[in-house]
Amino acid sequence: MNQPALCYFDYNATTRVAPEVLEAMLPCLREHWGNPSSAYGFGHEAARRLDEARARVAALLNADPQEIVFTSGGTESINAALHSALATRPERRHVVTTAVEHSAVLKFCHFLEKQGCAVTVLPVAADGALDLALLENSIRPDTAIVSAMCANNETGVLFPMAEIAALCRSKGVLCHTDAVQAPGKVKLDVKELGVDFVSLSAHKLHGPKGIGLLYVKRHTRYQPYILGGHQERGRRGGTENVAGIVGFGRAAELALGNLAEENTRVRALRDRLEAGVLAGIAGTTRNGAPEPRLPNTANLAFEGVEAEGLLLLLDQAGVCASSGSACTTGALEPSHVLTAMGQSAACARSSIRFSLGVYNTAAEVDYLLQCLPGIVAKLRGGPAGPALP
Ligand code: PLP
């Protein structure tokens, strides 16, 4: 068995900075390190690069550059959108979201509840789908915003955001989507989606960590979350992370260009991995609907196996994957996403997410399919199973 150097199947956790992105960033750190707010020419050069990057990320979303607010990442963008919706309409104290959102949404909603707001957390079906009639009925006269994710980070299941946004519009309620997992994998067009806010994060699309954006639809009232200087047209205080923003801009261009490959070659690799596991290892099932789903994500349950042990042995074999389980207060909590889909704690604890990307090869998938049956058999206490053909 030929072991590749590192089999990285965790693209939904983070991605490597693309060489083109690094190339674009380095001049901002080496030569053009001025403050974009400075009045002299040296600062103007940084400001020019920042404007260029803003246009590039706007193009990824089919947005206007003025609708982009750069932030420190997905988490800040999400917090900022929810905060603004409540701050600009203080008479509205109700938020609607779903049980499978990222903790950046759920924890902020929990915080809002402690501040006296009401939060409705919508359940999902066994395949991860959202009931839009339930969503419609949950909207109240005092609802400020609905926050639903474009693509689930654990299962890849897609929510029909255009329909959700249309529903919100018809009720006069703001709509935010956490689209952190979407760019480069599915088309993201804010004009087609019709949402008011979109959160993105550069490190999920081969950009650097610690930089993200919030799309704020033109004419949407906005109350900054981070107060300070006049940066970002007064919508986010703090000297801009110019190198990060420039890297994000280049990554956005690459993501647009990668869309076709993600939906052909990467999708085929993911399907080969998924089909290989389901056919080759007894007691395995897929979590979540097969479609509509991100083309790169497979969430698989291995009956009778603890995901932690599986991940450890995979790590020893040079394979990176992850589980949605979180270690809280010393105990392993099963994934809140899989639990919300009605799975037992045992099933949720036996599930692993494989998320692929443009740097993956067929040889890496073959290697995984060769070593996985033996690892699973070992963890199930039996003899190491035969390698898959
Ligand atoms: N939302 C989703 C769906 C995510 O997958 C992540 C990151 O894992 C985030 C939000 C948070 O983004 P960031 O790491 O940029 O704060």
Image (spheres, grey):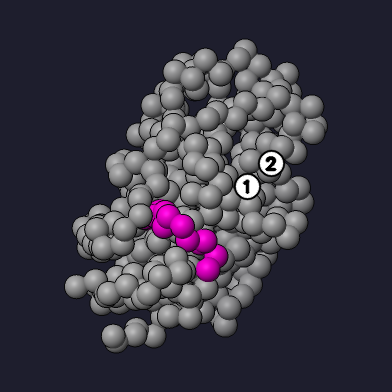
298 is within the stretch colored magenta: yes
Mark 1 and 2 residues: CB-CB less than 8 Å, in contact?
yes
Farthest-out residue, top:
141
**Picture layout, residue 338 above or below residue 86:** below
Q: From mark 1 to mark 2, how far is it between C-alphas?
A: 6 Å
The residue positioned 76% from the left and 47% from the top of the image is 227
**Residue 45 location, quadrant:** bottom right
Left or right of 337? Residue 372 is left
Residue 166 position within the rendered picture, expressed as x and y whole percent measured from the top left? 42, 23
The residue positioned 53% from the left and 50% from the top of the image is 346
Closest to the observer: 117 or 241?
117
Which quadrant of the figure contains the C terminus? bottom left
| Residue occupied by mark 1 | 104
Farthest-out residue, right:
115
Which quadrant of the figure contains the N terminus? bottom left
Q: Which residues are magenta?
A: 297-309
Density class for disc 1 (Cα within 10 Å; few <14, some 14-19, many ≥20) is some
Q: Does dot 1 land on a helix, a strand or a loop?
A: helix
Closest to the observer: 40 or 357?
357
Residue 73 position within the rendered picture, expressed as x and y whole percent measured from the top left? 59, 56
| Residue occupied by mark 2 | 108
Closest to the observer: 242 or 14?
14
Left or right of 353? Residue 220 is right
Amino acid type indicated by mark 2: Phe
211 is within the stretch colored magenta: no
